[in-house]
């Protein structure tokens, strides 16, 4: 479906041209089968994902260390054993969270922290807009599932800690024990992720059109 | 011609190109930047060997990270200093106007933009900060973006953006005495919930909105993101034009008349269709206060925290976790609860009108000894005006001291942190866990309600003090 669409195929060519000599700006994403970490809390805001006091860096690296800092560590710096990231029962490259994940501040540091920690997919029944954009711009796939499917995912990992999720971007599907659900993604963004392209390359290719627009 | 919404008019006029089934290439008229979300964008630009495409459409001010005391000295925190210095260096290298620390026009980016006339009706504006929605008060399409998007705009003056859906929120009637724009917005958010407008761009309408000053409109649009909206906007009118006129970067002379004629077209046409509409009555709004850990968890000040029966069963675990953090119980009354800190400031309520409201309540009274109050003007210009109007004197007599401008305790990136476990009545925009410092407990309110708490030491209905 993806490249068969003429208009998208056209953009694909433009991407390919502008990227010939450069490394891919974001990770490619195709299929991922992995265990997952459940975070059954709703309205997880970006201040929880990465508190403001850790936004002082001038580079994009190292934010994973402070992912969910104040839930993960006590004030004295010791690990909070109850928190899911510290619980050896749970592991994997997929984070599964309650509805309205990533609300609040526009800080892309939240997406960097999720990515830097090693998550490639975040699953929830609802995402805040800016976080979703930021995640996509960093090769982290936000997967929106139905509330029913989300409940099943939370329950399944409690029954079996080795439970896995299978995410297929090309198919736009997510599967739990063979139960499959399809998810939505804008075809343009899907193309970017499948190929590791980013928006800036696309826009740079449009400079002439932008200058024309300015003259009007 | 098909009737169009205000949002459609501004958005459509800025579309360079629409990708079928994908986002639009949207041209940006004004890009505001600050020290926290821009360094990685400039680094990215440099790595690609690019310079800023349209530096004259970019304006910079450090605000998030700066101290609110002794600004004339070197910033003590090494990382904060490095971020602020990096912003200065990036602006110099790229010929970007910078209102640096100690510059007479320095301040919070969303206070500085409007007060200097950078913000104008019909513009598209972005900033790496979710409260960019503030500028929608002028009838601009303004929204917060991530750092990768900041890089896009620096590189091309455009952003790839899917067009949001449209929502109209109408508040008709007259706000009661003691009820402010902040209460109006906290009320709307409490009705829609913290994710209730996600995916939408909001237009605020109705007589209660129309009767607000520009400061009040900015407060309302500022908080749009707190119900998940991409942005909020209000059609420009005489109140808007009067505010913009004469400001440094506003059009002058003949250009002004032409601009106003154009701006007058910026309103939703009769019959324009919104994807969702809500209507509220202004008379039903009382001074508002939040009791939980997201801005949707709010109630009228005379009300109480919902009981278990009043919360949807599926949301109860998260709700209880939130109350546990706040040290509150289901069904608790809010009036009379102890307050330790009061913060008046931020891009939500750090403008001159907010300081006037504060002064009107504390005049002739004394700050409660048990309360630590941080009064932080939104900009150097606000600070100056507060002095000129005699507000600083009123505040000092009542035992309050004005700090220097910045984002301060709204997000506690600098030293202005509320200690763990302490209660803060704050005029800022977020009551998230740890937002005002690790373990801090925030109750969002208007400047009037904050002032009432500051002089009594407990949650107090400001209407009782008039």
Image (spheres, coloured by chain):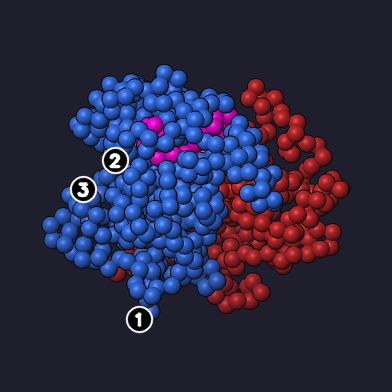
Chain colours: A red, B blue
Residue located 75% across and 34% down the image? A82
Decide which of B301, B355 is in the foreground and name it.
Answer: B301
Magenta residues, dominant SS class: loop
Q: Secondary structure at mark 1?
A: loop
* First in residue order: circle 1 vs circle 3: 1
Which quadrant is home to the N terminus of chain B? bottom left
Horizontal and vertical percent position of residue B85: 40, 32
Q: Is residue B156 visible in the rendered structure shown here? A: no
Left or right of A184? Residue B25 is: left
Tell me the residue that label 3 is attached to.
B247
Q: Chain of mark 2?
A: B
Q: Residues within 10 Å of mark 2 (few under 14, many from 20)?
A: some
Tell me the residue that label 2 is attached to.
B353
Tell me the residue that label 1 is attached to.
B1
| Among the 4 quarters of the image, the one containing residue A125 | bottom right
Q: Nearer the viewer, mark 2 or mark 1?
A: 2
Q: Secondary structure at mark 2?
A: helix
Q: Is residue B435 magenta?
A: yes
Q: Secondary structure at mark 3?
A: loop
| Among the 4 quarters of the image, the one containing residue A69 | top right
Q: Is residue B459 visible in the rendered structure shown here? A: yes
What residue span does the magenta drawing correspond to? B428-452
Q: Nearer the viewer, mark 1 or mark 3?
A: 1
Measured Cα–Cα span from mark 1 to mark 3: 35 Å
Q: On the same chain: label 2 and label 3?
A: yes
Left or right of A23? Residue B84 is: left
Left or right of B18? Residue B396 is: left
Q: Residues within 10 Å of mark 1 (few under 14, many from 20)?
A: few
Question: What label sits on residue B433 in the rendered view?
Answer: none
């Amino acid at each position: 479906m993806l490249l068969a669409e003429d208009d998208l195929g056209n953009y694909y060519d433009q991407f390919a041209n502008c990227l010939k000599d450069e490394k891919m700006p974001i990770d490619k994403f195709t299929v991922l089968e992995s265990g997952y970490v459940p975070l059954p809390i709703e309205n997880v805001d970006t201040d929880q994902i990465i508190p403001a006091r850790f936004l002082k860096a001038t580079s994009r690296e190292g934010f994973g260390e402070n992912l969910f800092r104040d839930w993960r560590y006590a004030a004295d710096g010791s690990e909070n054993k109850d928190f899911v990231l510290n619980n050896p029962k749970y592991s994997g490259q997929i984070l599964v969270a309650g509805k309205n994940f990533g609300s609040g501040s526009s800080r892309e540091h939240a997406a960097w922290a999720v990515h830097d920690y090693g998550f490639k997919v975040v699953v929830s029944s609802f995402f805040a807009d800016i976080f979703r954009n930021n995640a996509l711009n960093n090769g982290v796939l936000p997967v929106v599932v139905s509330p029913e499917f989300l409940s099943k995912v939370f329950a399944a990992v409690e029954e079996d800690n080795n439970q896995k999720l299978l995410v297929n971007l090309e198919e736009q599907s997510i599967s739990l024990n063979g139960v499959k659900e399809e998810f939505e993604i804008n075809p343009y963004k899907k193309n970017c992720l499948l190929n590791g392209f980013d928006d800036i390359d696309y826009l740079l290719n449009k400079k002439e059109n932008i200058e024309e627009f300015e003259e009007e | 011609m098909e009737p169009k919404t205000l949002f459609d008019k501004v958005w459509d006029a800025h579309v360079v190109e629409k990708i079928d089934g994908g986002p639009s290439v949207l041209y940006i008229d004004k890009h505001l930047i600050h020290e926290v979300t821009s360094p990685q964008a400039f680094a990215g630009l440099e790595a690609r060997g690019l310079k800023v495409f349209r530096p004259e459409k970019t304006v910079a001010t450090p605000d998030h990270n700066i101290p609110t005391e002794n600004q004339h000295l070197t910033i003590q925190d090494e990382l904060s200093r490095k971020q602020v210095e990096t912003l200065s260096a990036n602006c110099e290298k790229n010929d970007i106007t910078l209102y640096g620390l100690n510059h007479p026009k320095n301040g919070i980016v969303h206070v500085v933009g409007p007060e200097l006339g950078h913000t104008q009706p019909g513009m598209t504006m972005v900033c790496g900060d979710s409260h960019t929605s503030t500028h929608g008060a002028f009838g601009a399409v303004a929204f917060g973006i991530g750092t990768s998007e900041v890089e896009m705009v620096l590189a091309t003056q455009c952003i790839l953006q899917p067009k949001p859906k449209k929502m109209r929120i109408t508040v008709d009637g007259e706000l009661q005495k003691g009820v402010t724009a902040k209460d109006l917005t906290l009320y709307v958010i409490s009705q829609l919930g913290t994710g209730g407008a996600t995916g939408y761009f909001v237009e605020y309408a109705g007589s209660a909105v129309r009767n607000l000053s520009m400061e009040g409109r900015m407060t309302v649009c500022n908080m749009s993101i707190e119900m998940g909206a991409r942005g909020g906007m209000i059609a420009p009118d005489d109140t808007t034009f009067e505010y913009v006129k004469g400001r440094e970067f506003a059009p002058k002379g003949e250009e002004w008349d032409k601009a106003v004629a154009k701006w007058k077209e910026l309103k939703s046409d009769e019959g324009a269709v919104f994807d969702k509409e809500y209507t509220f009555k202004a008379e039903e709004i009382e001074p508002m206060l939040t009791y939980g850990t997201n801005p949707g968890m709010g109630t009228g000040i005379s009300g109480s925290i919902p009981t278990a029966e009043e919360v949807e069963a599926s949301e109860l675990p998260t709700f209880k976790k939130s109350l546990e953090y706040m040290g509150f119980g289901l069904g608790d009354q809010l009036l009379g609860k102890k307050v330790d800190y009061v913060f008046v400031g931020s891009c939500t309520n750090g403008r001159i009108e907010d300081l006037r409201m504060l002064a009107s309540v504390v005049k002739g009274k004394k700050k409660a000894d048990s309360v630590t109050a941080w009064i932080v003007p939104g900009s150097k210009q606000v600070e100056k005006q507060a002095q000129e109007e005699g507000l600083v004197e009123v505040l000092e007599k009542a035992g309050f001291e004005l700090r220097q401008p910045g984002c301060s305790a709204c997000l506690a990136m600098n030293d202005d942190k509320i200690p763990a476990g302490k209660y803060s009545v704050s005029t800022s925009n977020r009551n998230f866990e740890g937002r005002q410092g690790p373990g801090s407990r925030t109750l969002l309110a208007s400047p009037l309600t904050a002032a009432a708490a500051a002089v009594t030491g407990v949650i107090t209905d400001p209407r009782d003090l008039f």
